Amino acid sequence: MDRQDLTKGPVFSTMSLFALPMICGNILQQGYNIVDTWVVGHMIGPDALAAVGAAFALMTFLTSILLGLCMGSGTVFSLCFGRQDKEGLKDNVCASFLLLFFITALLTAGALLSVDALMIFLNIPGQITAITREYLVLVFWGIPAVALYNFFAAYLKAVGNSMLPLVFLGISTISNIGLDLLFVAVLRQGTFGAAAATVLSQYLAAFGIGCYVLAREEELRGAFAAFSFRKQSLAQIASYSVLTCMQQSVMNLGILMVQGLVNSFGTVVMAAFAAAVKIEAFTYMPAQEYANAFSTFIAQNIGAGKMERAQQGIRCAGKTVAFYCLAASLAIWLCAGSLMRIFIDSAQTEILAEGVRYLRIVGPFYCGIGCLFLFYGFFRAAGRPAVSVVLTVISLGTRVVLAYLLSSRNMLGVIGIWWAIPIGWGLADLAGAVYYKQMKKPEQ
């Protein structure tokens, strides 16, 4: 397997080339989400789109817990790789896998046992309760596959290999699209078919990347064969992973609470939100993945003691993400209507209008979320994941509180939910900038 040492070479090209496969991988994933939304919206109907949209928000929250554990572990792996600590890397890999195994088992069992309570929490309208439940029960069985894939992907990215996760994600995405069309468009299996396509493809990616890495990576295979670790390794993994997990889960819990509020406005708003969020996720996703690559870059250089190079990386990433987000905001403003019509039939004028309104309220502020992604990545790499948790609480806490206040009948209605989103981003960015300056003071 090809590894990339991010402590050497030109900063911009090194970071960008490492980020490129990660961005391409997420484009593939978002491309699948777009196809899935198109298939459900056009071939089943608005009710199914609303159900899948609500389920997507819930699954994003649940899998964010696993993603947070893997991201935190990946930071520790990067630090070990940066300082060439092979034994420490083996210890931390085993400790991380054990922690992830237990969390995944608990999460999967808990989700399956509480599916009805979760639907009540989400305010699922009665007309789509049955299809939402059917969809959720099946996709919950895919949680272990998500955990396995992200564990191996985190390890590979930590040691500088961002290409291999892309390969297996690409295989999974192509199979997902093919199965989606087969089960929904040809076999007419409805939302059950869409869920089955997702779960089968998740397991294909998970087992594929796991078998390939263990076959090719002798050090990792040896670590699993011995499967031993020091208590200090477990403590270090837990300190990074649990806090990063909290950051990811708090973020997505806030989104889930907003989804519940959106659901209270009926299926028109639900369908508009489901489509608009898919467009939005695709639009600012490159900034998110670039920030994840930036985090690995910072962690490797901190591990190697190259602090000046880390500072160069911060300046480079800030300019790159700002430029991209400004371009993305302009594109969303100009193309909002055309993008919504990808998912929604032109006859559904109410849904289209609400989706366009959402995109034109939130879209101009993508620099806010791009900057926030960089803060998350930096503080995680710098060994201060608790700060990322605080920033997430500020961002999502503000969003949830304002969404409920501003959306009341005496205030702005549903657009109050939309305006709460960029306000939350802005306040978290301000807090992150203040804390970063405080960190820099002793160095001046």
Image: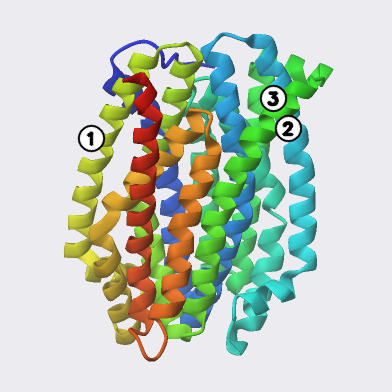
Whether 302 is drawn above or below 370: the answer is: above
Between marks 2 and 1 in the image, the one whose residue lies nearer the viewer? 1
Between marks 3 and 1 in the image, the one whose residue lies nearer the viewer? 1
| Mark-to-mark CA distance, 3 and 2 | 6 Å
Q: Quadrant of the N terminus?
A: top right
| Mark-to-mark CA distance, 2 and 1 | 36 Å
Mark found first going from the N terminus, 2 or 1 = 2
- Classify mark 2: helix, strand or loop: helix
x and y, in percent, of residue 194 in the image: 58, 65
Q: Which residue is mark 2?
A: 97
Q: Which residue is mark 1?
A: 319
Mark found first going from the N terminus, 3 or 1 = 3
Q: Quadrant of residue 412?
A: bottom left
- Amino acid under disc 1: Lys
Whether 273 is drawn above or below 109: the answer is: below
x and y, in percent, of residue 260 in the image: 54, 75
Q: Residues within 10 Å of mark 3 (few under 14, many from 20)?
A: many
- Label of residue 93 in the image: 3
- Amino acid under disc 2: Phe
Q: Are marks 3 and 1 in contact (CB under 8 Å)?
A: no
Specify whether 376 is left or right of 413: right
| Mark-to-mark CA distance, 3 and 1 | 34 Å
Q: Are marks 3 and 2 in contact (CB under 8 Å)?
A: yes
Tally of numbered discs: 3
- Classify mark 3: helix, strand or loop: helix
Q: Quadrant of the C terminus?
A: top left
x and y, in percent, of residue 55 in the image: 58, 68
x and y, in percent, of residue 45 in the image: 47, 80
Whether residue 175 appears in this view of the structure is yes
Q: Residue at x 35, y 42 (%)?
A: 434
Q: In the depicted view, which residue is nearer to us: 125 or 79?
A: 79
Q: Residues within 10 Å of mark 1 (few under 14, many from 20)?
A: few
